[in-house]
Amino acid sequence: MMGLAAAPVLMGAATTPTEFAYGGDPRQTLDLYPQPGLSGASMLLFVHGGGWNIGDKRGVNALPGFAERHGLLFASTNYRLTPDVTARECAQDVAGAVAWMLKHGAEHGGDPQRLFIAGHSAGAHLVALVGIDPVYLDAYGHAPAEIAGVIPIDGAGYDAVRQMARPQRPGPIGRRLDEMYDLAFSEDPAGLSPTLLARPGRAYPPFLIFHVESRADAHEQSIGLAEALRAAGGTAEVVAAPGETHMTVNRDFGLPGDPEGERAARFIATGRL
């Protein structure tokens, strides 16, 4: 299930964020977590989940502490939500936050050539879309290849056409999921599906794709995304998270000893899968 509830905030006084606007809408803001003494640090921008419909940039869980331990400049962004917009405008906003980090990250000790973007659930779809379809970053004078790496976490909307073709899901939760996909994608499911948009001849950042081992749709969608990237000449690795749920993989990501967070830390440190 694509995250239907905002995650709690776990942070200490040392990681109190500063809010910056990257656009004119009240939702077009990001939280930056400054660290004294950073210089030329890798940067990590996080995109929350919530079914493209709810959620907030404050739902960062263990990530501020993760960034402190690994010497990263960390930020978490908001974006406009359905039903006011579709997934297209959500992705436009994520691209705006990426452009802000590329422009301003160095002012806060970051390295614009070492920007990684991660997202959970709907946020996983959005970082994948911005990392694959050049139209979003092109609007800001940038390209996907300027991103050092993309880390989608337990997304299931990379191929919205396939998801929306599934039989109607039973019960109230099923109806909510169907409505969620309709609100986000009904305008143009294929045009908002990163799996369907990977093309040979384009330069893509490497993708480290996590999914909960027990979620069949997330597994299927993650494998499909990786295969599409490889077929287009990109690089991608899929990592299954055993014993996790859709919510715990997000809540625990980056805790000391968390295997998914440690795998991501190695990727960020080296830039290699």
Image (tube, rainbow, N blue to C red):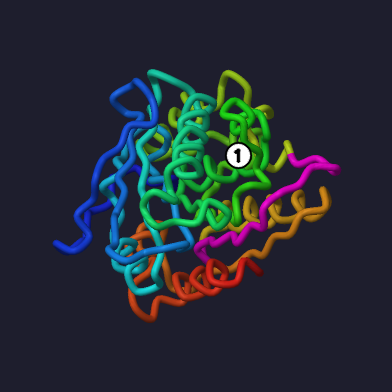
The magenta stretch is: 198-214
* Magenta stretch, overall SS: loop
Residue 109 spot, x, y in % from top left: 39, 57
Residue topped by disc 1: 129
Relative side of 193 to 153, left or right: right
Residue 23 spot, x, y in % from top left: 38, 25
Residue found at x 39% / y 49%: 107
- Note whether 186 is above or below 178 in the view shown: above
Q: Mark 1: which amino acid?
A: Leu
- Note whether 270 is above or below 219 in the view shown: below
Residue 70 spot, x, y in % from top left: 40, 72
Relative side of 58 to 245, left or right: left
Image-quadrant location for residue 187: top right
Relative side of 30 to 146, left or right: left
Image-quadrant location for residue 174: top left
Crowding at mark 1 (Cα within 10 Å: few <14, some 14-19, many 20+): many
Residue found at x 62% / y 36%: 142
Residue found at x 60% / y 39%: 129
Q: Secondary structure at mark 1?
A: helix
Q: Nearer the viewer, residue 113 or 241?
A: 113
The question of residue 212 being in magenta is answered with: yes
Image-quadrant location for residue 244: bottom left
Extreme left residue here?
A: 13
Residue 54 spot, x, y in % from top left: 32, 35
- Note whether 77 is above or below 187 in the view shown: below
The question of residue 5 being in magenta is answered with: no
Quadrant location, the C terminus: bottom right
Residue found at x 77% / y 54%: 234
